[in-house]
Amino acid sequence: MHQKIQKVIINGVVPILTGIICEGIEKGLFSTPFPYECMEMVVAYSNTVFDDDMVKMTNEERASRIQAFAFNAERLLGAQSGSLMYVMQMIGSGNGDSNE
């Protein structure tokens, strides 16, 4: 069941987010020749690493991964440094559970 949900997310969410990235490219917010592939990488990583059942990590490790995720997503998308740091707050404000 989990694998089927993952497949739906990758095949359904990535095209939607790619459209948003393409709009961002038109507005000069992003600069990438690979919008679909960038979103595929971002969704696959975030859906795997931030899934509490997949990767066990402490709150400190989670905070570090969230920061690295935003940093690297900015580079993938050609976004201004620091422009996606709000993602840190969105992901980090989940349910507060930890896998410690």
Image: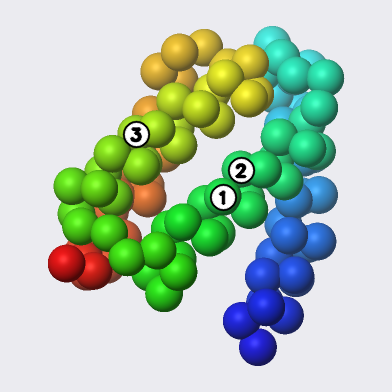
At a point 37% along the width and 50% down the height, the residue shown is 91
First in sequence, mark 2 or 3: give its number.
Answer: 2
Indicate the amino acid at tag 1: Tyr
Contact, CB < 8 Å: mark 2 with mark 3?
Answer: no
In the image: residue 38, left or right of residue 57: right
- Up the image or down, 4 lies above or below 67; here it is below
Indicate the amino acid at tag 3: Gln
Res. 67 mark: 3
Q: Residues within 10 Å of mark 1 (few under 14, many from 20)?
A: few
Contact, CB < 8 Å: mark 2 with mark 1?
Answer: yes
Q: Marks 2 and 1, how far apart in space?
A: 5 Å
Corner quadrant of residue 79 = top right
At a point 74% along the width and 51% down the height, the residue shown is 14
At a point 67% along the width and 43% down the height, the residue shown is 41
First in sequence, mark 3 or 1: give its number.
Answer: 1
SS label for mark 3: helix
Q: Position of residue 21 (x, y in %)?
A: 72, 31
Res. 45 mark: 1
Q: Marks 2 and 3, how far apart in space?
A: 13 Å
In the image: residue 6, left or right of residue 79: right
Residue located beneath label 2 in the image:
42
Indicate the amino acid at tag 2: Val
Q: Marks 3 and 1, how far apart in space?
A: 13 Å
Q: Position of residue 16 (x, y in %)?
A: 76, 50
Q: Position of residue 87 (x, y in %)?
A: 41, 39
- Up the image or down, 96 lies above or below 3; here it is above
Q: Residues within 10 Å of mark 3 (few under 14, many from 20)?
A: many
Say which quadrant the N terminus sits in. bottom right
- Up the image or down, 26 lies above or below 61; here it is above
Q: Residues within 10 Å of mark 2 (few under 14, many from 20)?
A: some
